[in-house]
Image (tube, grey):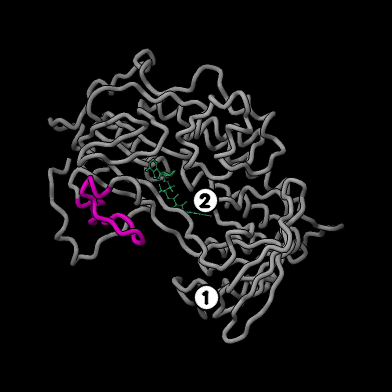
Amino acid sequence: MLEGGFIKHVCGDHPFKSEGLFYRFKEDERDAGHTEDNLSWHSVLPQLEGLGNIAPKDLPDAIGDSSDMVQKNDLDHLPHMMFDEHNADLFDNVHPIKWVDPNSEGKYDMLVIGGGAGGLVTAAGSSGVGAKVALIERNFLGGDCLNTGCVPSKAFLKCANVIHAARTAGEYGIEITGEIKCNFPVVMERMRKIRAEISDNDSANRFSKALGIDVYMGHAKFTGKNEVEINGKKLTFLKACIATGGRPAKPDVAGIENVPHFTSDNVFNMTTQPKNMVIVGAGPIGAELGQAFQRLGTNVTFICRGDDFLPREDRDAAEHLVWQLKKDGCQFMHSSTIQSAECLDQGDQSAGKLPQVKLVIKEGEAEKNVEVDTILFAIGRKPNVTGMGLEIAGVEFDEHDGVYTNEYMKTTNADIFSVGDCLALASSAEEAKFNPGSGF
Ligand SMILES: Cc1cc2nc3c(=O)[nH]c(=O)nc-3n(C[C@H](O)[C@H](O)[C@H](O)COP(=O)(O)OP(=O)(O)OC[C@H]3O[C@@H](n4cnc5c(N)ncnc54)[C@H](O)[C@@H]3O)c2cc1C
């Protein structure tokens, strides 16, 4: 914060300051964003429970007469969702069923696009030092970390560690008698409950009411160097921050579009434990989830493109991890790629019936036919940088690398910064692109 000039900003005398916000009272919030009275995702649960993971485009039909309760313009960006009481609590916090955007006039000191870890911290920090702040999120506040990343994965891993501790308790002189088994639906429900409880911290209401930030729900697009469009309204800003994160890379496998498969985006929707799972990818996300599934009782096989597992990590550490994963029972296929995938049976997750999938895997020169019920792709991530007018704003980016920034997170537009998973730090040779600009 000090390095970014925020603290100096509060003390200094310059335009990037809204003194009114230092003394913001509840009655000043009438124009702030809010949920329409008494509306909650719980009110549509009876229509949705039991439908399994529902595609957003099917939501209005599934809700029937109440379809006007959902902001339809947002649906395209929402991932498949499963509805239960915990997720209804989560959505009430991070994507309220009918959020009314703030009715604010004037220029924002700081406009943040993306309400994940990077965006929330930027918005809260800026507001905390007196800036008039807008925060725009098209999907779920909390971003990957809360919804599909750190929080659900660590809650899931905890259960795997507990079962491992129980199985190895004898080594510590602790005797556990009887069969030690995983109750997978309970493991996943615990994860959803923890996620919902934590989500209050990242909620639209907290950011709007307690932190005094104007929260908008929808897809943001730059329409000028200092202008953004959201839900048909134009907002102007002195400074902006792009914190749009990333998404799992899409698999390039013949036939995969007709085969049920998972990425980190939907793996935490699972309710039925896979019997045998192929994990494509040799990175940290696959590694931690693979070990957890294996310890909970799924037979896990890692498909690694090259010779090494965790190729970007320190070799000694990676080899130690491989040793442990093998001890846990994981299998490895190296120099391997999936040539094609075919669905033999779609299964029905809501009825606990797993799909049956045939994979043709090339391992070195050999071709193998493998049948599994679950495929998880953890093959890297892509930054969210397209379809948001970065070209119009004069922000240079690359579809694979992300938004280019200098070491101060400044983009090629001196008024726009970028943080988190969507950015690519420029090499020193490229630093020349960055206009020193006005800074703060
Ligand atoms: C399975 C898994 C486990 C992980 N575990 C850990 C861990 O243990 N520790 C750790 O430090 N990290 C972990 N991570 C990584 C961590 O989740 C990310 O680094 C972090 O969430 C990135 O935050 P972000 O703010 O950059 O992006 P995100 O959290 O992705 O947030 C970006 C937000 O921007 C929104 N958005 C995108 N475009 C627009 C637009 N045009 N308009 C409006 N909104 C938009 C998106 O909907 C999203 O909500 C994990 C990730 C995964 C997938």
Residue furthest out toward the bottom: 365
- Residue under label 1: 305
| 360 on left or right of 217 | right
Looking at the image, can residue 285 be seen?
A: yes
For the point 45% across and 30% down, the residue is: 204
- Residue nearest the observer in this picture, 234 or 109: 234
For the point 51% across and 44% down, the residue is: 146
Which quadrant would the N terminus be assigned to in this image? Answer: top left
Highlighted range, magenta: 390-412
Residue 67 in magenta stretch: no
- Residue under label 2: 149
Residue 411 in magenta stretch: yes
| 29 on left or right of 372 | left
- Of label 2 and label 1, which has the lower sequence position? 2
| 185 on left or right of 361 | right
For the point 39% across and 39% down, the residue is: 219
Helix, strand or loop at disc 1? Answer: loop
| 126 on left or right of 194 | left
Give how far across and how far down residue 237 sits, in percent. 23, 34
* Above or below: residue 338 compared with residue 105: below
> As shown in the figure, which amino acid type bears the numbered disc 2?
Gly
Residue furthest out toward the right: 178
* Above or below: residue 248 compared with residue 58: below
For the residues carrying marks 2 and 1, which lies nearer the camera in this image? 1
Q: In which image quadrant can residue 19 be found?
A: top left
Q: Residues within 10 Å of mark 2 (few under 14, many from 20)?
A: some
Q: In which image quadrant can residue 8 be found?
A: top left
Label 2, label 1: how far apart the Cα atoms are: 24 Å
Q: Residues within 10 Å of mark 1 (few under 14, many from 20)?
A: many
Mark 2 vs ligand 1: CB below 8 Å: yes
